Image (cartoon, helix red, strand yellow):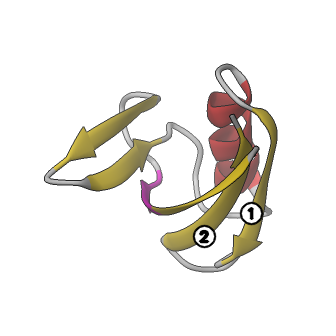
């Protein structure tokens, strides 16, 4: 079953984790937002718990639309 998530990415952070706060998903990644590094780290974090994680929208934005299988 596929699910679409709206996330906010905080790149160049001191940690790598996914937090749900006030019904919003915030993803902290250590990678910088250059050369797709932060996007790859976001996908790596979501792939630990979900299959086939991919970014549908927002490749160059901090707000992203993510598709995951649950």
Based on the picture, tell me whether residue 9 belongs to the magenta stretch: yes
x, y percent for residue 29 = 50, 40
Q: Please, what secondary structure does the residue beneath circle 1 have?
A: strand
Residue located farthest toward the front when viewing the structure as drawn: 1
Along the line of sight, the residue nearer the viewer: 68 or 42: 68
Which residue is situated farthest in the right direction here? Answer: 52
Which quarter of the image is occupied by the C terminus? Answer: top right
Q: Which of the image's four quarters has the N terminus? A: top right
Q: Where does label 1 land, which residue?
A: 55
State the residue in front, 65 or 29.
Answer: 65
Residue located 38% across and 42% down the image? 13
Image-based side of 36 in relation to 46, left or right: right
Q: Is residue 54 above or below residue 13?
A: below
Residue picked out by circle 2: 65
The image quarter containing residue 51 is: top right
Spatial distance from mark 1 to mark 2, Cα to Cα? 6 Å
């Amino acid at each position: 079953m596929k699910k679409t998530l709206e996330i906010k990415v905080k790149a160049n952070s001191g940690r790598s984790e996914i937090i749900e706060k006030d019904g919003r998903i915030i993803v902290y990644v250590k990678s910088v937002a250059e050369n797709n590094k932060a996007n790859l780290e976001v996908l790596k974090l979501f792939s630990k718990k979900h299959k086939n994680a991919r970014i549908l929208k927002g490749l160059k934005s901090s707000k992203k639309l993510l598709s995951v299988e649950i």
